[in-house]
Image (cartoon, grey):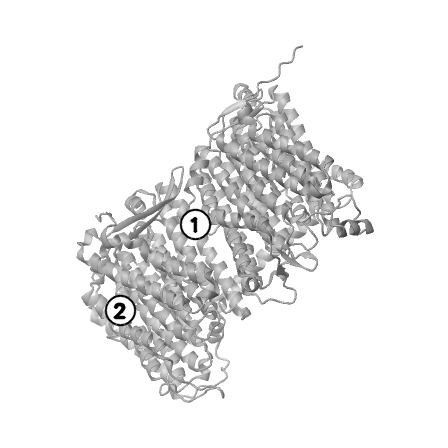
Amino acid sequence: MTEIIPAEGIFGLLWVLIALPAVGAVILLFGGRRTNSWGPYLGVLTVVGSAVLGVLMLLAMMDQPAEQRTVVQNVYDWVFVGSFQASFALQLDQLSMVFVLLITIVGALIHIYSLGYMSHDPDRRKFFGYLNLFVAAMLILVLANNYLLLYVGWEGVGLASYLLIGFWQQKPTAAAAAKKAFIINRVGDVGLSLAIMLIFVTFGSITFQDVFGQASEASEGTLTAIGLLLLLAAAGKSAQFPLQAWLLDAMEGPTPVSALIHAATMVTAGVYLIARSNAIYDAAAWAATAVVVVGLITIFMGAIIGSAKDDIKKSLAGSTMSQIGYMVFAAGLGPIGYVFAIFHLLTHGVFKAGLFLGAGSVMHGMNDNVNMRRYGALKGVMVITFITFMAGYLAIIGIPPFSGFWSKDEIIHAAFERNWVIGAAAILAAGITGFYMTRMIAMTFFGKKRWEDDAHPHESPAVMTIPLIILAIGSTFLGMALLFWGNIEEWLEPVVGYESVPTPLPTSFYIAVTLVVVIIGAIIGWVMYARKDVPVEAPRGNALTRAARQDLYGDAVNDVLVVEPTYRTAQALTTFDTKAVDGFVNWTATFVGDLARRLRRSQSGFARSYALSMVGGALIVALALILVRL
Amino acid sequence: MNYTPPALDYAALAPMIVIFAAAIISVLVEAFTPRGVRRYLQLLIVFGALIASGVLIVLNAGTRTVTAGQAVVIDGPALVLQGAIVILAILGAALMAERSIDSVGDAFASRVSSLPGSEEEKQFTQRGYLQTEIWPLTLFAVLGMMLFVSANDLLLMFVALEVMSLPLYLMTGMARRRRLLSQEAALKYFLLGAFSSAFFLYGAALVYGYSGSITFPEIAQTITSKPGESLVLMIGLGMILIGLLFKVGAVPFHQWVPDVYQGAPTPVTGFMAATVKIAAFGALLRLLYVAFGGVRWDWEPIIWIVAILTMLIGSIVAVVQTDIKRMLAYSSVAQAGFILIGVAAASPAGIASTMFYLIAYGFTTIGAFAIIAMIRDANGEATNLASWAGIGRKSPIVASAFAIFMLGLAGIPLTSGFVGKFAVFAAAIEAGMVWLVIVGVVASLIAAFFYVRVIVVMFFAQPTEQTASVAIPSAFTTVALAAGVAVTVILGVVPQPVLDLVTNADVFIR
């Protein structure tokens, strides 16, 4: 059993990890124009500071024996009312450690990149303020030692994401996308808040330690309910089916935002939540199965959408959905999958950030055009971007020895340990990944020039390419480093558990099959988009392509099922509230009708109908009182 | 028959006596002092009395007593709520005292008796007459509210209800601009208020008929000692509830709320929205817990139904509102529903969390209305949502403050609204009301939509020609606004001191 160690030594600075970017955000957002000149650099420094501190903590943690790596720091008592207690307490263990490193290191690189990418934006200072705010909130999310504080971070990253999606507010589409992201995320948040309530009722506490310690004592029904509610929350934040619709629109935000928030970190919070709550899912088989199903559906939805989009960022967004689908899927497999879900999360965080920043670098050189049909033959003009993008490409499709290979292969292998059908599905999806990513590089870097007349592509400045190079190195080596040098299974095992089940066939067989399928997918993509000419106008395409271009009708479904009915109800209620009260009263009882007519004669104007509604209400109250008695 | 006057605990009653005395002096000032000095005298009296009363409440902190012949009770909830009412009244009075944001003067008609649109009205305005009757009315309303939360019998509760309400009806009709709308609202408020008072009074009579007493402890005693069921009691209880639910603006007794919030002068709306809710919920809690605790199983379902209707209808209808004051009115209806969840919990945690919620809501609301008064175009306040487009570009600080209020009302973490909602929901969950909480969480999801919409309009929409400008307020509004922002944030980040305060004060004495 893992001990809880009070935070001492370097771990006493746990709160500083969060405080640095938080202070940065406050200074930048409230400092006004005075901070315009040096503000962005301060924003970068705070995150770099947190990253350095994070690395020092990793080194200190590695010195400890495995069972003494969980430290808790109580910053202050936040809400204590009745038996309900929630502290602002931070917990650093092996799981949150890797997240801290991912968030701060990738975050720092993206901050640096943004110095170049946003150099011409008049609101640069605000942008860095929001980014700092995001980093602080995300660190709260992963460092919380209880569900309520996690919820604070959860809402905080949502808010930051919302502010950053709508950052270019002059575009109406950006404002609409921001609102959509916020609303859909609120649906997920309802799941999380209900889950917290239910956890509190069931266990009388909301700290991870208490809840997981008693998880086996609760009834399976309750645990299933909690698991499903947490899954709803995860689906909202991580853009999983059926709450996936916001992520594609979220690409309206500046590209560094897409890289940091909508690829590497925030959207993986759902996976963190599920992996963190492993004790609940381990005891609730149905909920875990639901997680697998949601993950699997999203893997395919994302891959199909990614295959059809001509917008490079949206295609990458589809790919993100799909890759997070893999992580959710792995987390649903239970102790055979958690560590690999996190493993893939880490490698994906690095290579997808690299891909997005690469896409941003391409856009930077192409007058912010995102249409891949207007790219082509860029490999000679943007050499560094091209090479680093290729590293990300090889990583995501899973070619050894690039980092995605190791993590995805482990997930596929874990899937086969459970069931060969889902294993085969995971392999098929890997093939589609090979297809759409090859399509992307073929349309962007190979083939013929299809540039707009005024486009003068050029390589980006060093402040942008250096982060690309570092991320490309990560895309190449991180997988091997974590697996062979870092022993990721062993590292995470005390927090999320790990077991391995023998499969009927040797591991090398699955690797071989996966590689063959991926290469077939890649070859199809190459033949279709690099060997043939890509038309500048998108052809009509088949039914699936058209559906995928419409995000598989995610918006239409939302409109029909949620938006329209809500608006209709609201309109109807407004009418009802101001005009139709009489009808309601007449319906209540006949003698009220008499009263109504009498009152109607004696009064005029709206006050009359309001008073009538009060009479109606009085009748309801009286009826309720009498009915309760019966 | 000899009449013995009841013993009065002057120390315990002092906070109310100060307000009462000040209100009377304020009337005299209105009658006998020259016009030029009135405003300054009135401000001195009002702020002096409110601050003195607040200090006396703090000095009374440990007092737990029943006085004035069983009629008034000073206990934990009474002191906490009186304190909240007084502090919010100070902020409300500050908004009413504001003169800088309208070029013509303050928010009130120069002479309420003049006909709207008449030559006479113009002359009064030109001469710069200021209307100061608002001040004694404010003090009487505050007195009524303070008495309302400490009334221990039905008769005094009714008197307090009227002392609170009658000045508010008048204050509603005093707007300087859009006077017809304001007067119409006042008349409606008065008619419907009188109607609801009649329900209350008739219910009180029935309960007296059942129990032979009007004091809460004796009613409670009769309920526990009398065997069997009583239709008279039930109908009496129901009617009293209607009177109180009207004041809190619960569905289906809510229809006055949008009209009155929209029509009343904005500082009055802010004052009223914050304080009346506190007073009415305080009275409702005491009545239900002390007098009718024994028939809890009978009134709980009603509170359930009303809470669900109130949350859902308030939230849903707010979604389609285009006028910001009307939207906040429906929002206040929805908030009343959330607070009713705490009432339904029927436990000390329920009392504590309800009080916390009320305090949090009061400060956020008054701040929000302070800003509404500042957003103006040529015709006075620009309350149409369309004219708020892009305000965030022009005045980022004001718009950020409003955004904080909206996030607070939506219950986003690290704002007071979140802690309040969570405390109320947790209390209800502990009392086994899981379904009620589920409805509450869903309603708060719907509510988040329209709160966020305002933020979107302010920050993410392009300013148009219609976009209003932000008037620069004097210190009065600035202080009220700053207090609103500070409390909204502080109660979200370090709520513990206030939570301790309400938790230590969660027992009604009998």
User: Which is more toward the observer, A34 or A83?
Assistant: A34
Residue A296, how many percent across, how many down?
Answer: 37, 64
The chain letter for the residue carrying disc 2 is A
Say which residue label 1 marks.
A193
Vertical order, A130 against B286 (above or below): below
| Residue A69 horizontal side relative to residue A27, left or right | left
Residue B213, how many percent across, how many down?
Answer: 60, 20
The chain letter for the residue carrying disc 1 is A
Q: Residue at x 23, y 66 (%)?
A: A482
Residue B165, how many percent across, how many down?
Answer: 66, 36
Q: Residue at x 46, y 48 (%)?
A: B418
Closer mark to the observer between disc 1 and disc 2: 1
Task: Classify the position of the C terminus of chain A by image quarter.
Answer: top right
The quadrant in which residue A31 appears is bottom left
| Residue A13 horizontal side relative to residue B455, left or right | left
* Separation of residues labelled 1 and 2 (CA atoms): 35 Å
Vertical order, A57 against A378 (above or below): above
Asked if both marks, 1 and 2, belong to the same chain, the answer given is: yes
Mark 1 element type:
helix
Say which residue label 2 marks.
A409
Amino acid type at mark 2: Asp
